[in-house]
Image (spheres, rainbow, N blue to C red):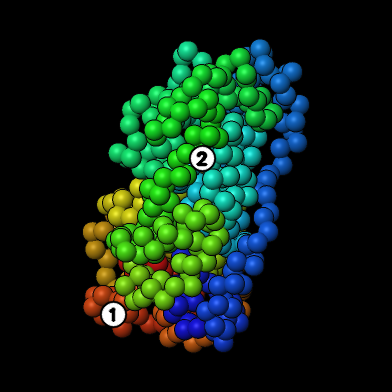
Amino acid sequence: MKVQYIQHLYQRLGFGIVPNQLVQLANKDRHQVVEELFYMSSSMTNLSIDTTDLDHYTSETVIGNKKKLFEFRDKSKEKLKAYNLAWIERLINTSEALRERMTLFWANHFVCRDENIFHMVQYNNILRANALGNFGDFVKAISKEPSMLKYLNNKQNRKQKPNENFARELMELFMLGESHYSEEDIKESARAFTGYNNNFEGEFIFRRMHHDYGFKTFFGSTGRYNGDDIIDIILEQKQCARFICKKIYSYFVNETIDDAKVEELTSIFYKDYNIEKLMRHIFMSDWFYQQEHIGAKIKSPIEFLVGICRTVPVTFESAMDVLKIQKLLGQMLLNPPNVAGWKGGKNWIDSNTIMIRLKLPSILLANARISTKEKGEFEDAFETYITKKRKNKFVNVTVDWETFEKQFADYSINELQELLLLPKLSEGTKTYLKTLSKSSKQEYCVQLMSLPEYQMC
């Protein structure tokens, strides 16, 4: 398999590939490379942190005790910061690359936010467990998760006083997309999800006295439907498969949608809603490796940060530093902007974030120092900003250049460019690269990561 195709594959379903992996895979064919990725992600490893110091907060100790509840919330918020760091570290170091990439994708599809660490960890691992499974089972599991029940107000959804929030977002954002349902469908389906609840420990509870057992008419069918029945009826609509396939195509292939390719994927996915089969078809297709798709997407802040740290191993001394970087870049894990999630694409880049992105490699790896021929207004303003921040210890990291040198030992300094940059270089970048001294692999690596082309995958 061509080296460039392997790099493209690993950029899209992972977060890049290190040279020793590239050497191992270069002599394998596409089927072997893809199958190995699926094999490595065939099992699922839960992501957890130590929460034993919160174990004494239970239904018995918290419910009805405001002081204990506020105390738990404060401690839970601190744990969420640690969980954010744990997730970043998992993305950097995982061997289950495809599953973790899919988990990140679904986290911005089934968008949710919760201040309860127990419930958020549970939710995150539900995403991970179902990331390559059956989509219908996935949606049903999500509909019963305490974090989602709270986030979209379904705990307040009761007989004779239905709350339509979850039912609306289920169709608009999770399964069908806008304009593929009626207001009456929302009202009727909301009745089917009445009685959904959970306890403090995160167990789903179906409160029978709060459920509407009456007949509901939904998408032209009538019955005494519950939530799972509603999901099954939506799955019967081919638009559901089309909506998911279009979103997956945009995320994994190209944001410029090819309707014919989306229909090809829809026909496959609609048969059984098997996510793994769908993804395998994409990565085995010739069209996935067409030049127009390689290096055509803007990296999300998380992709960008994780990609840097996979190439040059970095240890963050504080979870707050990781959160600070995510906030500056515009994407903080576990803290989506709204139920629609992050828009992605060109929305990742504005006048503030591009400045941070272009300097972040030097901030992390070279203490914000990087060789430039001349400084302009842009560089001067940014270095003033960073210098001020450094006095307050902007970030504290340990950079493992030794591992970097070992990983790139078999490659010359001139080969770093092909390893780190996938897109076609602009004429301005080509000219700039000719001016660099290439005095060391370390310095040249930082310089390459500081180019606009490194923002693409």
Quarter of the image where the C terminus is located = bottom left
Rendering coords of residue 357 (x, y %): 37, 58
Res. 232 mark:
2
Residue at left 37%, top 55%? Answer: 246
Q: Is residue 208 left or right of residue 342?
A: right
Q: Could you say whether the residue bearing mark 1 is in a helix, strand or loop?
A: helix
Rendering coords of residue 162 (x, y %): 46, 18
Q: Label 2 near label 1: C-beta < 8 Å?
A: no
When asked about the image quadrant of residue 453, the answer is bottom left
Residue at left 58%, top 25%? Answer: 196
- Report the front residue among 265 and 146: 265
- Residue under pointer 1: 430
Rendering coords of residue 440 (x, y %): 47, 80
- Report the front residue among 285 and 325: 285
* Residue 176 in view in this figure: yes
* Neighbours of disc 1 within 10 Å: few (<14), some (14-19), many (20+): few
Q: Is residue 82 left or right of residue 175?
A: right
- Report the front residue among 17 and 108: 108
Q: Could you say whether the residue bearing mark 2 is in a helix, strand or loop?
A: helix
**Circle 2: residue type:** Asp
